[in-house]
Image (cartoon, grey):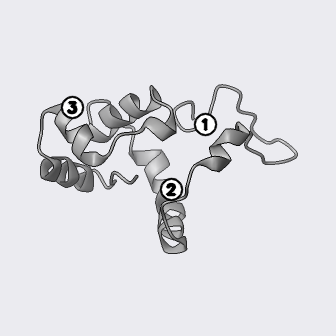
Amino acid sequence: YLVRFCEDIQFNAETNQIEFDAHYLDIKIKKDKKALYDFLEQTPQNLLVRFKNENALSVVIRRHLLKLHPAEWPELKDVAQQLNISEATVQRRLKHEGVSYQQ
């Protein structure tokens, strides 16, 4: 939960809410409604399965992204270059893990 959300999580609360800084509202949305639906449909499985292997490529990339402001997140080709592997290999390994790199 700490990776996905924050340290101040309250379960069984009277209301559900997520608070974030208003400046995030200025970031342009780059996906359509179908992409959102697909993401939400896969989220429960991703929350349970994705983080089991601490050495998985998706975990390595996620750790790197969490150190950056979302507006600074690199494109896939730059991530691949930083990892010293080809973009196609990154895509293939992420697909094998059941995730993708979406900007």
Task: Give the number of the mark in front: 2 or 3.
Answer: 3
Q: Quadrant of residue 57?
A: top left
Tell whether 88 sits left or right of 14.
Answer: left
Q: Residues within 10 Å of mark 2 (few under 14, many from 20)?
A: few
35, above or below 64, in the image: below
Q: Residues within 10 Å of mark 1 (few under 14, many from 20)?
A: few
SS of the residue at dot 1?
loop
- Residue sitting nearer the eye, 5 or 20: 20
The CA span between labels 2 and 3 is: 27 Å
User: Residue at point 39% right, 36% down?
Assistant: 62
Q: Position of residue 99 (x, y in %)?
A: 34, 53
Instruction: Look at mark 2 in the image and give the residue it sits on.
Output: 43
Q: Earlier in the sequence, mark 2 or mark 1?
A: 1
Could you say which disc has been placed on residue 5 in the image? 1
- Residue sitting nearer the eye, 29 or 100: 29
The CA span between labels 2 and 1 is: 13 Å
